[in-house]
Image (spheres, helix red, strand yellow):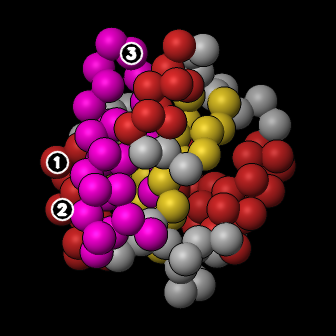
Amino acid sequence: MGGKVVLAVSPDPGIRELLQMVLESALGVRAALAADADEALRLVHRTRPDLVLLDVRPPELGSLEVARRLKSDPATRSIKVVALIFWEEGRQEALEAGSDALLDKPFDNVDRFIDRVQKYLNNAA
């Protein structure tokens, strides 16, 4: 497994499992998994991820708190945050919270998803 770490945050265990499988098998990175913002913030300080993938779901937008906190802390603001969005109105909220990029759900094209995540990892500070 490579030296890079990606933290995947989703309240849905199926999404976490899918992201872990794709991250580890297709990208060769270590996946850290969190079900909510509190767990994600604890893991950020423990794992120091290169990238955070946030599954953003209405009306529960708690995952955006992860982006807000990471970007407001000088120790973590360089961590790239990518919001996984499936509704149009959430795009602006995710960007305002500090997300560096957006990826649309569902992932109809897994190869494109892998390519985009790889690009974000390569550009991670």
Q: Is residue 103 left or right of residue 40?
A: right
Vertical order, 59 against 119 (above or below): above
Vertical order, 123 against 22 (above or below): below
> In x, y percent, where is residue 67?
36, 47
Vertical order, 113 against 64 (above or below): below
Q: Which amino acid does the dot numbered 1 rest on?
A: Asp
Q: Quadrant of the N terminus?
A: bottom right
Distance between mark 3 and mark 1 Cα atoms: 18 Å
Q: Is residue 123 left or right of residue 124?
A: right
Is 118 colored magenta in this rendering?
no
Q: Which amino acid does the dot numbered 3 rest on?
A: Pro
Q: Quadrant of the C terminus?
A: bottom right
Distance between mark 1 and mark 2 Cα atoms: 6 Å
Identify the residue shown where x is 38% and y is 38%: 97
* 25 vs 8, nearest the viewer: 8
Identify the residue shown where x is 61% and y is 39%: 102
> In x, y percent, where is residue 79?
44, 66
Q: Is residue 19 visible?
A: no
Tell me the residue that label 3 is attached to: 58
Tell me the residue that label 1 is attached to: 38
Q: Residues within 10 Å of mark 2 (few under 14, many from 20)?
A: few
State which quadrant residue 36 falls in: top left
Q: Residues within 10 Å of mark 1 (few under 14, many from 20)?
A: few
Residue closest to the far bottom: 3
Label ID, residue 42: 2
* 13 vs 90, nearest the viewer: 90
Circle 2 SS class: helix
> In x, y percent, where is residue 82?
54, 48
Identify the residue shown where x is 38% and y is 65%: 77
**Disc 1 vs disc 2: Cβ atoms closer than 8 Å?**
yes
Across the whole image, how many numbered discs are drawn on residues?
3
Residue numbers of the magenta segment: 52-78
